[in-house]
Image (cartoon, rainbow, N blue to C red):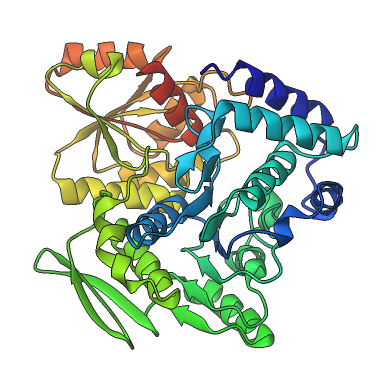
Amino acid sequence: MSAAQSDALLARMMEFHPKIIDLTLDRVRRLLAALDHPERKLPPVIHIAGTNGKGSTQAMIRSGLEATGAHVHAYTSPHLARFHERIRLAGDLISEPALAALLDEALAANGSDPITYFEITTCAALLAFARTPADYTLLEVGLGGRLDATNVVDQPALCVITPISLDHQQYLGETLPEIAGEKAGIIKRGVPCVVGPQDAAALDVIEARAARLGAPLLAHGQHWHVEVEAGRLVYQDETGLLDLPLPKLAGPHQVHNAGMALAALRALRRGDGVEAAVTRAEWPARMQRLRAGPLVAALPEGTLWLDGGHNPAAGAAIAATLAQMRLGRIWLICGMLNTKDVAGFMRPLRDAAQHLHAVSIPGEAATLPAAATAQVATEAGIAASTAETVADALAQITKQDPHAQVLICGSLYLAGSVLRENR
């Protein structure tokens, strides 16, 4: 069904966007009150914050829960190809009629008051979750944690904090402890919290907040451990040892994401879903191999990969994944936003890259111009040039190397554009 109606409503929501984004829960709480407090009527909530790995970890938790027979709501952002991806109701993506009706209701309840796009759409999602029966609600933080629009649930069943690194400094703070303080803002009094691998400075902040609130921590390296042994994933906590297949999602960083998902499932007493968590989870634009479509057809003898990582930690994770996959030197097609640490993202990729074709991200006002992206790549030690579009870049690459291994990377917004173009 066409998404024209919901697209029009989403466009209207931008009219109420404040001129300056100030992180606050006041606008969200006002609208939720007007909607009769759906945040108080949700199935048990698992709240997930962090810098990297939130989406993959959520996907693995969801796969594990669903394998036990549970019906699971899931909220994530941003979307890639279409907004409906953000809201999954009891296992299924929200339908166009349901989404349009919810957005219309949220708009009517908000009136003409200022509110951000993310805030009003989050309220619509919570309304959907409150009205649809399910066993669990997975809520992924959009930005930060303490003042994120999802942080309106007073008593979640479980919190999860994935690895924290520098990103969104203009909103969250310039140092790792400052950013960790914002992420740790999802921790609630007495609620268990699974903590992924952390820099010591971030972990200190998380532990201090948990101690103040009496929130039991389940921290990597202390309460649970995960590693690869003989081509298997080995997880251990006080409950015992698990010997499982490696995650379906590619990359060594997915081992830690799997560990967080397994710790969460054990905390929720859904341990019978652990194998499904690692073997069934799918999450697009995370070292995703594209196997069909016009962009793939433009590279008939090569291989095309897609990743939406966009900060220094993601660059390091991509580099480690490429090394593990032993693809040889890879051709990069890269587009990034001007708000990101572009050099920090590119430096880890220097040794893996054959050449980088820089593109501007279609339809994104905050895109870094292709020429600027190419310049940063060159300064990072990667040979670079520009291309008008991803298709143009692929045409240039195939002329030079018909058997090229190509990775499109740098932004989830670029990844979404690619998935739409490659349908």
The answer to which image quadrant residue 107 occupies is top right
Establish if 26 lies above or below 412: below
Residue in view at x 38 percent, y 56 percent: 66
Q: 220 left or right of 227?
A: right
Is 371 placed above or below 170 here?
A: above
Q: Nearer the viewer, residue 86 or 316?
A: 86
Horizontal arrangement in the rendering, residue 90 relative to residue 406 (left or right): right
Residue projecting furthest to the front: 133
How many labels sit on residues?
Answer: 0
| Camera-nearest residue between 284 and 100 | 100
The residue lying at 60 percent from left, 67 percent from top is 180
Outermost residue, left side: 230
The C terminus appears in which quarter of the rendering?
A: top left
Q: Is residue 111 left or right of residue 32?
A: right
Residue 145 placement, left or right of 298: right
User: Residue 6 appears at what percent x and percent y?
Assistant: 64, 24
Measuring from the top left, give residue 236's x and y in whole percent: 27, 80
Q: Nearer the viewer, residue 58 or 24?
A: 58
Residue located farthest toward the right when viewing the structure as drawn: 112
Residue 255 place in picture, x, y as percent: 29, 62
Residue shown at the point (65%, 19%) measured from the top left: 5
Can the viewer see residue 389 in this picture?
Answer: yes
Q: Does any portion of residue 147 appear in the rendered image?
A: no
Q: Quadrant of residue 45?
A: bottom right
